[in-house]
Image (spheres, rainbow, N blue to C red):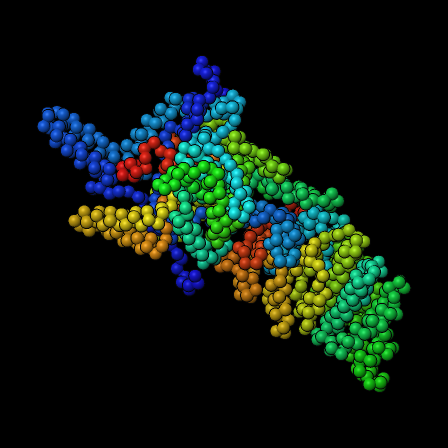
Amino acid sequence: MARMTKQSRQPRRVTPRGRPGPGGGMVGYVDPAPEWRGTSVQVCGLWPFGAGAGSPMVGVPLGRDLDSGATVCCDPVSWFMRTGLLANPSMFVLGRPGLGKSTIVRRMALGLSGYGVHPMIFGDLKPDYADLIRAIGGQVITLGRGRGNLNVLDPGESGRAATRLTGDARHRLLADIHGRRLHMVSALVTILRSAPPTDREETILSTALNVLDDRYDARSGRVPVLADLVRVIKDAPEAVRAVALDRGDITRYRDITENLEASLTALLGDGRLGGTFARPTTEAMKLDRPVCFDVSGIDDSESLLQAAALLSCWSYGFGAVSAAHALADAGLEPQRNYFLVMDELWRVLQAGRGLVDRVNALTRLDRQRGVGLAMITHSIDDLMALPAEEDRTKARGFVERAGMVISAGLPPAELPQLTQIVELTEAERRLLVDWSTPPAWDAAHGRRADPPGLGNFLIKVGNRPGIPVHVDLTAAELEINNTNRRWNK
Amino acid sequence: MATEEITPRTYGNFRKPHTSGLRGLSLGATLLLLVGLVAVVLASLVSLWAALGVAMALALVTASLGLRDRHDRTLMQRGAVRLAWRRTTSSGGHLYRSGPLGRSGYGTCRLPGLAAESTLTEAQDGYGRPFAMVTIPATGHHTVVISCDADGSALVDERQIDTWVAHWGQWLSALGAEPDLIAASVTVETAPDSGVRLQQEIDTNSVAEAPRLATEMLREVLSSYPEGSAQIATRIALTYSGAARPGMPRRSAEDMAVHIGTRLPGLTAGLSLTSAGTAVPMTATELAEAVRVAYDPTVATLVEEARATGGTGLTWKDAGPMAAQEAWDHYRHDGAFSVTWAMTEAPQGEVFSNVLTGLVQPHRDIARKRVTLLYRPHTRAEGARVVQQDYKNALFSAQQSQIGRAREDAEVTAARRTTEEQAQGHGVIRFGLLITATVNAASELPKAAAAIDNLAPAARIAVRPVYGSQAAAFAAALPLGLVLPLHTAVPQTVRDVM
């Protein structure tokens, strides 16, 4: 408020120093900041860009930046689709057990479900995710001996999708189904034998599967099981005999297929893999809601069964997702986005030689758009401990190809391995080692103290500086999962 | 440069430009003393009393020019500020009232003080990007502001930082060769995160059929995360002069806009390697918003919300404060209180490149903080001349004292190194630094001052509040391109020798 004065209220002319008169804000004295002088090679040392502006505010809010306290938002789907920072919408999560690896993935899954992306948990061994998926109205499919079965020859959603498609799209999908089945059966044989099937056996399997398809048309309504595949091989149809190169000699044919038959038979009954994959699927997966395959019923001692179960879930799930893509492309279904989680990757990769290739083949999608992928493993050492060199190289490719790498605390011994794949600066390495510090003994309260690095993660995209983030859980999340109670400080 | 050296690079050798006369007096004071002594001799011919009187006056003047406080300010300067402040307060110039009932004219909210005459135009640069240009008619200055997105040095290797800093040096060096460029400033502003961006992100992406749990989680995140986190904005202002100079008549704002437009793409591209991040020129609306928020932080949230929903439409006429009041040691503008400090001593000795990082990072005790580095590059020719002059002065001082004092020897060495660096093609640049802390209540000012008192020594600089000139200093710390040394009443050449 200017005081009422008797002088005219006409504002006076503006001068270079402001408007004269009371209330005009004219500057009386200009006191320039003292100036110093230097050459540009020295003056640049007073570098003003040391404080980072933070990460893009795009994606699911995860927590706060440990340096600046700014909110960090990040998830592979949003970053790939809306920032252009990622080459593909996949992420690799690694870190010591107990530091909250699954927590950050759970947060992304929950946030993405709020953004209309369906999380799909392909194989949950703990169970880490089943509660969450149930809480957001998803489908939880239980697998394991006597709990639930997943028929590896069941194309699931893909089969139904193929009947609705026509022309090229249909052919592509059928070829995809065939490829997946072949890879899956070969992978199971690999797990069983700890060695991959020979190329001749693979050819026999491939032809046998084709024969099987002719016998059980998709319209017949009955889905073949492994037993039917074994029967096809036993029946020795002409096509299979031709590729088995038995030279018209049935006894030679029997010799050739003996090992394969033995392996497949072992898969059927109460062999090492317990028939879980040889019986008709107990519950079909739906594509319009979150899904979790709960395989926690399988005991940790049965590592082969665990690997087989995980692999089957991946095969089945990825098959369903590519079917959904095909339907969306044909305009028969709405375009849906998924966030796929592959936990405990190393269990599968270590189950046998050549499985890295199988995983690659089974988790291949024609289109990356709108499908986020999270691969979780304990450490790089798990991948680097593979016996065969080519497997190690391919496993390394998993990490290298991932759009981003999220790492929790890691023991110092693992860093050299990691730095070969992910460019880490000295400061980042220190941070990761610090976070892997073991928790202190809390003698006073007689309870387990939280590890210092709990909930801290480093988000690396390419060779950009990492984003250190602490995931702050909300009350809503704490209620749904008991393993989170520990976070309650 | 991939050298295998482990020793971190250090920087230093900053000199305060001053002319040297006798015994630490400046050249001006020395000349005054000599003329005065002649006058005393002449006066003694008239009468002894007159001579005594002149001698007393001379002693007083020399003392006021020769005695410097710890901030290197003479008694004369301090007296001048006091006198000017008294004049300002008695004429009511320390008050500013704008808007419909104010004195700024026509019901607008123009900027107060030195920027009162400024106008804002928008043009397009060589890439077709729109950019805003602030024109200050009195000095013929035209300023363009580039907004950056710094990466930060938190988890980066020393070598990478050295690369960035080296490129920053190159960029600064190139400023000296930039035609008509007279000043540049880098403003790093930290402000509390309003949470609007997060809210936008969540609101635009959430779907109607989201599970209840996800909605709850997102709502809780929105209410708890933004609290206590900060936003950092980095802005670089480049000030060009369109004033007449030999062989070049005064140029209009349109001509300067074309000139700056052709220069901008190269300058923004050069910033990409300095870790300043993506450099984009600010549009007129963005700049008006930034200035408006600086003068009235309470509208920050509103501005962000409006920006996300179709723009604020703020113009330069509304960018200023509704009311502002300058005090001796702080500045009150709309709903906030600010204090501006100036650096009175650059880091002495050798410093690492992270020396300012602590200063520019967000601080708990200061709601909003602006750290502005003001650069005035010398042209190549000027640079060569001034470093040569520095070297001569250093030699002169060293020869004055019979016993070679270590300090003077060091000065000579340092000055020599500077001449060598200049000769190798590096630019010579003058720099100052202003820090503005803005808080929401007068009672928080002491806390902010204490925080700055802690931050400044860590950054190896000495600071003092710009007493009696808070309004001008506040405006100079904004990315407006106000080059204060060119706005003073006493011309710079005179001030330099005093």
Could you tell whether A421 is left or right of B84 in the image?
right
Locate the N terminus of chain B by quadrant. Answer: bottom left
Q: Is residue B2 visible?
A: yes
> How far from the left and from the top, in percent, is residue A352?
69, 72
Q: Which of A35/B407 is in front? A: A35
Where does residue B438 sit, x and y in percent of width and height? 47, 35
Residue A261 lies, with reference to residue B346, above or below; the image says below
In the image, what residue occupies the spot 77% across and 76% down?
A: A203
**Position of the C terminus of chain B by quadrant:** top left
B210 or B379, which is in the foreground?
A: B379
Residue A6 percent location from the top left of the image: 45, 13
The residue lying at 38 percent from left, 34 percent from top is B487
Q: How many marks?
A: 0
Residue at position x 45%, y 56% in the image: B163
The quadrant where residue B142 appears = top left
Q: Identify the image quadrant of residue B24.
A: top left
* Residue closest to the eye, B356 or B474: B474
Residue for point 75% across, 64% down: A315
Regarding residue B454, the answer to whether it shows in the image is: no
Counting from the top left corner in percent of width and height, residue B408 is at: 24, 49
Query: Outermost residue, right direction?
Result: A220
